[in-house]
Amino acid sequence: MKIDRVELRKIRMELVHPFETSFAREVARDAMIVTVFAEGLTGWGETAAMAAPLFSYETVETCWHILHDFLAPAIVGQRIPDAGSLARHTDFVRGHPMAKAGLEAALWDVWAQAAGRSLADMLGGVRERIDVGVSIGIQASVDDLLLRINMFLEEGYRRIKIKIKPGWDVDVVRTVRAHFPDIRLQVDANSAYSLDDIAIFQALDSFDLLLIEQPLAFDDFVDHAELQRHVQTPICLDETIAGVADARAALALESCRVINIKPGRVGGLRATRQIHDLCQTAGVPVWCGGMLETGIGRAANVAVASLPNFTLPGDLSASARYYHEDLVAPPFALNDDGTMTVPTGPGLGVTVRQDLLEAVTVHKEIITGDVA
Ligand code: OSB
Ligand code: MG
């Protein structure tokens, strides 16, 4: 595929409900959308970085810088038939996996459309419907949290994840478990604790949690391995796994027993597949995390979640759980059995609502490769 031009845009989408983690309270999602034009086809990608460097060092502005000044100019005018060739054009940039993943996603959409195949099919997906869960932020009170869990269970979600932080952990989980003894439940600390808190995680062992996500530092492998040796519940890494090398390190050091793969965090769909395969060989289950993506990023995540070793429910909720109106048609929705259907049309398998996209666009530029 010869790349004709790349369009970059920053968007801002208001969230239906504020989303609070141990690191921030978000009322809107700032993100970048990448559009690749190649041989008459149009492909779409989304970057996972947020406005501030609180989840990882990348931000919307660093993604803009890296995409605008380095990655897009490196591929415009080039023939790029697959993800391996793309990597040869973009590997010169050290790090910045979120910027790389946004561009790679748009190219995967183009490659899949050119092949007349769905993205899920191109990636090796094996499921028509996926199990999904919902990630619930920190609430003003435990009663509010119980109400929200109840609402999502009634909507059909079959796995609940709650965010924890010091002061909002063991007692909250105990109360949730008392009200909902049988639900599939897991927690996410977003790096809010240290090894001094081992007793908190040992206390969580009594609540039959599926996993404890990213309890310790965002860049740590060693302390997570130590913690895993002292708790029964599987530790799951999110922030720590920013690429294939990190997954190899985590497996070698036994830093976790589960990995949350976010394509946008690990550098893209090729890296996602590599990590998926490494984990499958190691007998480590994976699941697809989320970064409050719009339907564009969500479509790629849903495709990924259809791969064989994605055996735990993903943080892949319906469009309406995040946004009043999503950027794609049809929006993502739950089936009656609480699953989500993997699109089967060519590429992402959903249509981008360009009128709506324009309305949420804050800034855009086209990189043509012509010298200005
Ligand atoms: O840690 O998994 C996380 C959202 C933004 C940043 C980090 C995380 C999250 C979520 C929400 O938990 C997942 C989703 O529903 O998209
Ligand atoms: Mg997480």
Image (cartoon, rainbow, N blue to C red):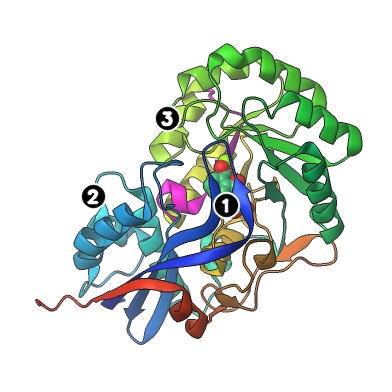
Q: Which residue position holds label 2?
A: 93
The residue under the point 17% across, 75% down is: 369
Q: Which residue position holds label 3?
A: 219
Front residue of this view, candidates 131 and 248: 131
Whether ligand 2 has any atom under 8 Å from the Cβ at mark 3 is answered as no
Front residue of this view, candidates 158 and 321: 321
Q: Is residue 35 magenta?
A: no
Q: Which residue position holds label 1?
A: 290
Element type at mark 1: loop
Residue 2, position as x, y percentages in the image: 27, 77
The residue under the point 68% across, 35% down is: 187
Magenta range: 254-268
The residue under the point 69% across, 33% down is: 211
Q: How many marks?
A: 3
Quarter of the view holding residue 244: top left
Label 2, label 1: how far apart the Cα atoms are: 24 Å
| Of labels 2 and 3, the one closer to you | 3
